[in-house]
């Protein structure tokens, strides 16, 4: 039911997504800069890739990389196919939910979550564990997402937009991965905070 609601939500929003999200999904380009300044990952998986903005940025900066994007919204993936047309030979798009590890061979060097984990209300803890299993030993997880807000009315509003925002993600990420980078920033004078996190799996897997 929750997944169907999200799919329905993006049926309308997919068409206006790229024109509007720059105004509140902060930190996406910064996270990609932080990734490419420290490694040259491939293959890469983005969970909840939406319209493919991050995948296109990664393709641009990493000309040898192979990428996989996964999303439950066919409407968002339709936009992604257009945005990624120039890179189609290197990018695979999967229309599915992340309800089990992909078990790709070779395993992923990098898994990216950009404003998608906060929408995975029911199984976010399992999703973090599937990502850990899908990474190669020493692989990186990179997450940019909403963190928290001091304003209950704002959290309720975000809840109506399928986003859970109550500081639940970071502690779990920090206990599942070795923390390499963490930044918490504030948006619109403190209306909400968002975080950038880069973590690493143990070299033993
Ligand atoms: C806010 S958008 C972010 C899109 C993109 N990552 C970006 O940074 O622009 C969240 C995306 O996650 C997808 N999503 C939400 N829950 C999902 C789930 N359980 N499995 C796969 N995709 C999901 C949505 O369909 C949507 O495209």
Image (cartoon, rainbow, N blue to C red):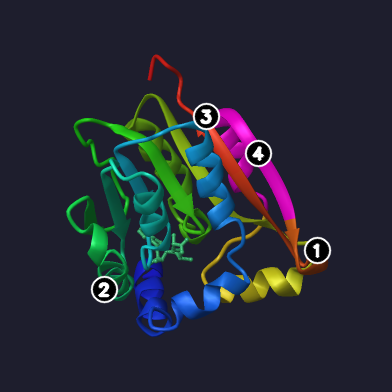
The disc, 2 or 1, on the residue closer to the chain's N-terminal end is: 2
For label 1, the SS is helix
Q: Tell me the residue that label 1 is attached to.
A: 190
Q: Tell me the residue that label 2 is attached to.
A: 78
Label 2 and label 1: CA atoms lie apart by 35 Å
Q: Nearer the viewer, mark 2 or mark 1?
A: 2
The disc, 4 or 3, on the residue closer to the chain's N-terminal end is: 3
The disc, 2 or 3, on the residue closer to the chain's N-terminal end is: 2
| Magenta region, residue range | 167-185
Q: In x, y percent, where is residue 16?
A: 44, 83
For label 4, the SS is strand
Q: Nearer the viewer, mark 2 or mark 3?
A: 2
Q: Is residue 178 magenta?
A: yes
Q: Does any portion of residue 47 appear in the rendered image?
A: no
Residue 182 image label: 4
Label 4 and label 1: CA atoms lie apart by 18 Å
Residue 177 image label: 3
Q: Quadrant of ligand 1?
A: bottom left
Q: Which quarter of the figure is the C terminus placed in?
A: top left
199 left or right of 148? left
The disc, 4 or 1, on the residue closer to the chain's N-terminal end is: 4
Label 4 and label 2: CA atoms lie apart by 33 Å
Report the front residue among 73 and 23: 23
């Amino acid at each position: 039911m929750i997944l169907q609601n999200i799919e329905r939500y993006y049926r309308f929003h997919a068409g206006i997504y790229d024109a509007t999200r720059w105004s509140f999904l902060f930190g996406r380009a910064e996270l990609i800069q932080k990734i490419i300044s420290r490694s040259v990952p491939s293959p890469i998986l983005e969970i909840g890739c939406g319209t493919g903005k991050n995948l296109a940025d990664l393709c641009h900066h990493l000309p040898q990389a192979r990428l996989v994007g996964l999303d439950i919204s066919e409407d968002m993936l339709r936009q992604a196919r257009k945005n990624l047309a120039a890179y189609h030979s290197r990018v695979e798009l999967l229309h599915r939910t992340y309800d089990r590890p992909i078990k790709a061979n070779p395993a992923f060097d990098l898994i990216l979550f950009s404003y998608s984990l906060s929408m995975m209300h029911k199984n976010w803890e399992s999703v973090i564990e599937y990502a850990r299993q899908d990474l190669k030993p020493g692989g990186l997880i990179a997450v940019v997402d909403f963190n928290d807000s001091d304003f209950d009315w704002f959290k309720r509003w975000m809840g109506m937009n399928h986003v859970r925002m109550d500081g639940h993600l970071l502690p779990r990420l920090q206990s599942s991965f070795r923390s390499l980078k963490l930044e918490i920033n504030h948006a619109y004078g403190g209306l909400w905070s968002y975080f950038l996190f880069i973590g690493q799996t143990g070299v033993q897997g």
